[in-house]
Amino acid sequence: MKKEFVISIIISLTFLSLGFLLLHYELIGYGLSFFVFLPFVLGYILGKSTIKAISLWGLITSLFIFFILLLAGGLEGMVCILMAMPLIIGAVAFGALVKYLIKKYDKTNKKENLIKSSIIPLCLFLTFGFVETELTKNVNHTIEVKSEIILPYSSMEVHETIKSVDTLNVEKPFLMKLDLPIPQKCILEEEKVGALRTCYFEEGKIIERVTELEKGKILRMDVIDYQLTGRKWFEFKEAIYTFEELKNGNCKMTRITTYSSELYPRLYWQPLEKIGIEQEHDYVFKNLVKDLKNKYGG
């Protein structure tokens, strides 16, 4: 039993490490092959006719070790891992279920060699990964996330307050308390098209170039440099603030973030990415409300 447990850990860590190395060297993409097919294969290889199989416990242990190593090495963040876990665990469970059903109706009841039985699935994973990468060409999907807030101030007052922010310091949303990037300040060097606006984070900075500026109406910027650690699969493209003067004298400010992502399947990842960006927007909005009150009262 101990031997099977150790072998299952070796197989799992080998598959996971190989998959991550292929990702790192961009030989496969952040798609179905890594997030679905690889854990499915592991669930199938290490699944038995009972949920209490010692090999499955070896796989669970390996996943825990793998995630800890990613965190410790700064290769991925806690938020990314937590978001990926339901997809990975679901694929493992499905693989184990398929193995269970095959075992249940297979009357030969022959004993398997875990190492030998992992060779063909490993080859299938590599083939699937390379074919998927070739077909998709690691295409980035460009997505727009929009958030709005109505403020009891004029459009000019809101514009003047948001263009440069000396300190962002309000209650952090849940994902920021884990490891979502936390903005500290944003500095606009000049109020003109072509000027740079730099946003500093705890883990790095984002540099933007102003492409459209009309005071009290719009501030549009292209992201020209992204120096946050990790997240090779994610890239900010554009940041836009629009200001609309309402009839009652209030201002409706809209924050639009445009980004690209390599993560597949999009049906799973896009809603999670949206949640993360909306929490960034919410943090900026809360700080803006605080700054407006300090500057103009109310």
Image (cartoon, helix red, strand yellow):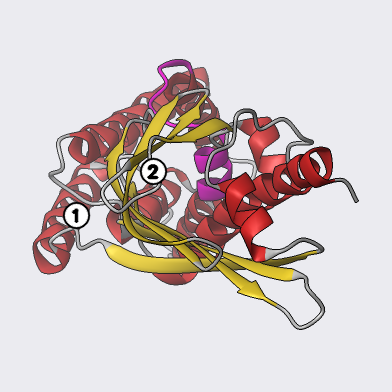
Q: Residues within 10 Å of mark 1 (few under 14, many from 20)?
A: many
Placement of 44 over or under 59, stated as above or below: below
Query: Can you tell which quarter of the image residue 220 is in?
Result: bottom left
Which span is picked out in magenta? Answer: 72-85
Q: Are marks 1 and 2 in contact (CB under 8 Å)?
A: no
Taking the magenta stretch, the answer to whether it contains residue 100 is: no
> Horizontally, is 168 left or right of 17 in the view?
right
Question: For numbered disc 1, what is the local secondary structure?
Answer: helix
Disc number for residue 25: none
**Residue at position x 40%, y 17% from top?**
73
**Residue at position x 50%, y 41% from top?**
80
Examine the residues drawn in magenta and state their main secondary structure.
helix
Q: Is residue 101 visible?
A: no
Question: Which of marks 2 and 1 precedes in the sequence?
Answer: 2
Q: Which residue is mark 1?
A: 129
Placement of 62 over or under 111, stated as above or below: above
Question: For numbered disc 2, what is the local secondary structure?
Answer: loop
Query: Can you tell which quarter of the image residue 60 is in?
Result: top right
Name the one closer to the observer, 111 or 121.
121
Percent x, y of residue 181: 53, 35
Name, please, the residue furthest toward the right. 298
Q: Is residue 259 visible?
A: yes
Percent x, y of residue 182: 58, 33
Q: Which residue is mark 2?
A: 111
Percent x, y of residue 54: 56, 33
Name the one closer to the observer, 244 or 181.
244
Q: CA distance from mark 1 to mark 2?
A: 30 Å
Name the one closer to the observer, 293 or 226.
293
